[in-house]
């Protein structure tokens, strides 16, 4: 049986996906994950590869989805954020992590524990996009 040939459009879409920054969303609030997904999927060069709402799901998805970047809710249920970050670094030392929190005062702790960047959930969406952009400089599909 003949396999259908990929059209030029499909081939280009596959190349864009291969070059895209693969992003994993980790937040216990469905509305936050949805808003992040909508924002990121509208950006060229970004692909949301999974979502997690607790630490167990995050650690599993970090292995299975092979993300380049995790957007991590600093208050994600399951264990302390510092332990979560340490577990992510142990499993995936090259993984970029941007900590998100509704508490701007969490910035210092997140950065001290090794997050690559911090964005307050109260900041405008452009702040998150700028933080992602700063992390992906030099990435093949990045800015």
Image (spheres, grey):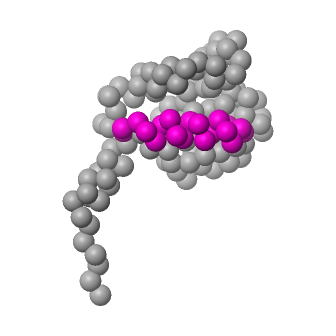
- Of residues 100 and 43, the one nearer the viewer is 43
User: Where in the figure is residue 97, as x and y percent of width and height?
Assistant: 55, 30
Q: Is residue 38 magenta-colored? A: yes
Tell me which secondary structure the magenta stretch mostly adopts.
helix
Pick the quarter of the image with the N terminus. Answer: bottom left
Q: Does 88 sit left or right of 94 as displayed?
A: right
- Of residues 89 and 100, the one nearer the viewer is 100
- Of residues 18 and 32, the one nearer the viewer is 32
The image quadrant that residue 107 belongs to is top right
User: Where in the figure is residue 33, as x and y percent of width and height?
Assistant: 62, 39
- Of residues 143 and 55, the one nearer the viewer is 143
User: Where in the figure is residue 66, as x and y percent of width and height?
Assistant: 49, 47
User: Where in the figure is residue 87, as x and y percent of width and height?
Assistant: 65, 36
Q: Is residue 111 above or below residue 27?
A: above
Kindly identify the residue that appears in the image at 70 percent across and 12 percent down. Answer: 105
Q: Does 45 sit left or right of 38 as displayed?
A: left
Q: Is residue 93 magenta-colored? A: no
Q: From which residue to which does the magenta span run?
A: 27-45
The image quadrant that residue 108 belongs to is top right
Pick the quarter of the image with the C terminus. Answer: top left
Kindly identify the residue that appears in the image at 32 percent across and 55 percent down. Answer: 14
């Amino acid at each position: 049986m003949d396999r259908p040939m990929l059209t030029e459009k499909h081939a280009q879409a596959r190349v864009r996906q291969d070059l895209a920054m693969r992003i994993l969303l980790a937040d216990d609030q469905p509305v936050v994950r949805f808003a992040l997904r909508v924002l990121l999927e509208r950006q060229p060069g970004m692909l949301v590869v999974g979502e997690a709402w607790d630490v167990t799901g995050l650690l599993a998805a970090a292995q299975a989805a092979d993300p380049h970047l995790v957007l991590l809710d600093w208050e994600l249920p399951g264990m302390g954020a510092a332990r979560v970050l340490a577990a992510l670094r142990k499993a995936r030392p090259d993984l970029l992590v941007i900590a998100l929190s509704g508490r701007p005062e969490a910035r210092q702790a997140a950065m001290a524990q090794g997050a690559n960047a911090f964005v307050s959930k109260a900041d405008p969406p452009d702040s998150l996009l700028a933080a992602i952009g700063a992390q992906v400089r030099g990435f093949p599909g990045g800015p």
